[in-house]
Amino acid sequence: MSEATQETAVAKRRRFEIGSIAPFLALLLLCGLGAVVNPRFMSFDNLTNVLTRSAFIATIAVGQTLIITGGGLDLSVGAMAAFVAGVMILFLNSGTIDNPFLLIATAMLLSLVVGALCGLFNGLVTTLGKIEPFIVTLGSMGIFRSLVTWLAQGGSITIHDSDLRAAYRPVYFGEFLGIPYPVYVILGVAAIGAFVLYATAYGRRVRAVGSNEDVARYSGINVARVRTITYVFQGLCVAIAVIVYVPRLGSTTSTTGLGWELQAITAVVIGGTRLKGGVGRVWGTIAGALILEVIGNIMLLSNLVSEYLIGAVQGAIIIIAMLAQRSLTRR
Amino acid sequence: MNKLLAGVAALGLMAGVAHAQEKLTMAVSIPSADHGWTGGVVYHATQEAKALEKQYPGLKVIVKTSPDGAAQANALEDLTTQGINALVVLPHNPDELTDPIKKVKEKGVFITVVDRALRERSVEDLYVAGNNPELGRVAGDYIKKKLGGKGDVVVIQGLPIPINEQRVNAFKKAIEGSQINILDSQFGNWSRDDAFKVMQDFLTKYPHIDAVWCQDDDMAVSVLEAVKQAKRTDVKFLVGGAGMKEMVEKVMNGDPMVPVDVLYSPSMVAVAMDVTAAGLENHIPVRGSFILNATLVTKENAKDFYFKDSPF
């Protein structure tokens, strides 16, 4: 990195610090609003419900943060989640291993492999094919979505064995020290994402590739490889989300994960990551995912809004949150 | 009546001519499987297509699924160019597909509409559907009776489309005058994930709920899970609808949380195909409406509505 860019980086640091806490401020404000609207909002059960529910989008959005920071985009994550979930449940139903815990562990491993392969596919087609990620992942979104419909033969794929289901159920519903497991999953995935992005040479390369592809290439960075790995990481994040998702309802349908890609991208942007790449905020993304989930929760707990208008109010709150953040970061 | 007979005669004549030249063709245009119920529709349509081709050696049945309304309009055009004698259609959105279906009819094709009635009712020759208002009424009546005319219920609705409206209005009418109180009513979009969130939040919002009406068995799965997680014992039971295999099984086994189900079976598409084929092949008068009952599935009759191999 040249001296000039380093200087600007130092100059910008202060501004970035405000920027990085803005989504958390927005989240706090929303929680305040929630408490006013319905005192039950602040109840421990409700807060853990919301945190747990946000696990899918939050986990997926961490992967999306890396991709977007590297100048890419992945629209296929929702369909990919449904596909990986389908493969996982079919494997669980196959009963190849007698020991239920070993079977579940193998199924988890399998979904990680499938997720990584799906991501690798997106990454390779994008980088080797030199096609816009928007188009590639729009295509793979269709592919994954149809594959799950085909696997389900149009219906739903459900874990048949109720004992197996009971053995796997605690992964979503169980808790450690009063906190549900999915919350630890969010923290773990975010910590890994943040470590990779901020503390490793690879993370620096991702940011370099995202802020200026040509400069990165001239400085000897293998742009294609750096980008492809972000897609593989995304695939792994999707698989982790699936591992937490499957035990909740024990089934997947062709509508599973519909619209998750947009929610994940929204969470990333609310969190302060630049959609054009170069700047990524993993923890901001987590705040963004929580904001999305909290808004929905407040809408339902309040009696203020007609059920027909919930979508409009959610949209408005997202826009207002972004505007508030912008005015904070510009200062 | 004369007009009807003439119509049937004309159809018979037309079919007869077609028969002399080549096989008769019936096209079936349905939404692709975007949730459990439509998954069931696809299953029953493909099964029935095979059965009908076996039953009538001169009949060819083409089943075509479409992911959305626009794609279905295109599919209708493509099917018509192939030359068809009858069309069985379950439209995505009946309002936007009325004109495309009308165009097919102008080619002299026999039109059977399933589940969702068209804007212009004169377009359809045969209409086969479940009874949406009845689905709401039967559920409402049951909840009223089971709770002894008094209690707090929450409602999880489907998508904001006309059939949802019909169900909900009939439900409200059924409990009118009783002391059944609807605490809240929100959209679950016939989606398991959405219904799970809505039910979790209902449980947070209301410390006491007697019963849940969620009008659809896909969403019932989520309601059960949410209640189980919250360890709430005040929720006595839920009433779903459609007749999903897993729920009918629970009714059969006497699960206290799922005492009944209200039928709105995706197999109605098979009924529509069967009656249409009978009209085509046997030249019998089949024009009119065929409304299937929203039968209350109880422990006693559940085995009649359990389709082991269906995905739904």
Image (tube, coloured by chain):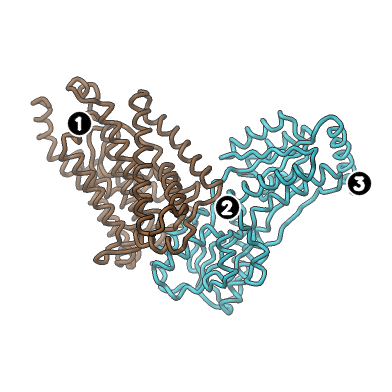
Chain colours: A brown, B cyan
From what the image shows, is residue B77 above or below residue A50?
A: above
- Indicate the position of residue A5 as horizontal and vertical percent values: 12, 28
Element type where label 2 sits in the image: loop
The crowding category of the residue bearing disc 3, from other C-alpha atoms within 10 Å (few below 14, some 14 to 19, many at least 20), is few
Q: What's the mark number on residue B29?
A: none
Asked whether disc 1 touches disc 3, contact meaning CB atoms under 8 Å apart, the reply is: no
If the image is split into quadrants, where does the C terminus of chain B sit?
bottom right
Task: From the image, state whether disc 2 or disc 3 is nearer to you.
Answer: 2
Q: Residue furthest bottom?
A: B148
User: How far is disc 1 from disc 3 in space, using C-alphas?
Assistant: 81 Å
| Quadrant assignment, res A115 | top left
- Indicate the position of residue B30 as horizontal and vertical percent values: 64, 43
Q: Amino acid at mark 1?
A: Arg
**Which chain is mark 2 on?**
B
- Indicate the position of residue A147 as horizontal and vertical percent values: 49, 40
Mark 2 or 3, nearer chain start: 3
Q: Is residue A8 left or right of residue A147?
A: left
Residue for badge 2: B311
**Which chain is mark 3 on?**
B
Q: What's the mark number on residue A205?
A: 1
Q: Please tell me which residue is depicted at 51% across the width and 45% down the height of the picture.
A: A151
Q: Is residue A45 left or right of residue B102?
A: left
**Does residue A319 show up?**
no
From what the image shows, is residue A93 above or below residue A228?
A: below
Q: What's the mark number on residue B2?
A: 3
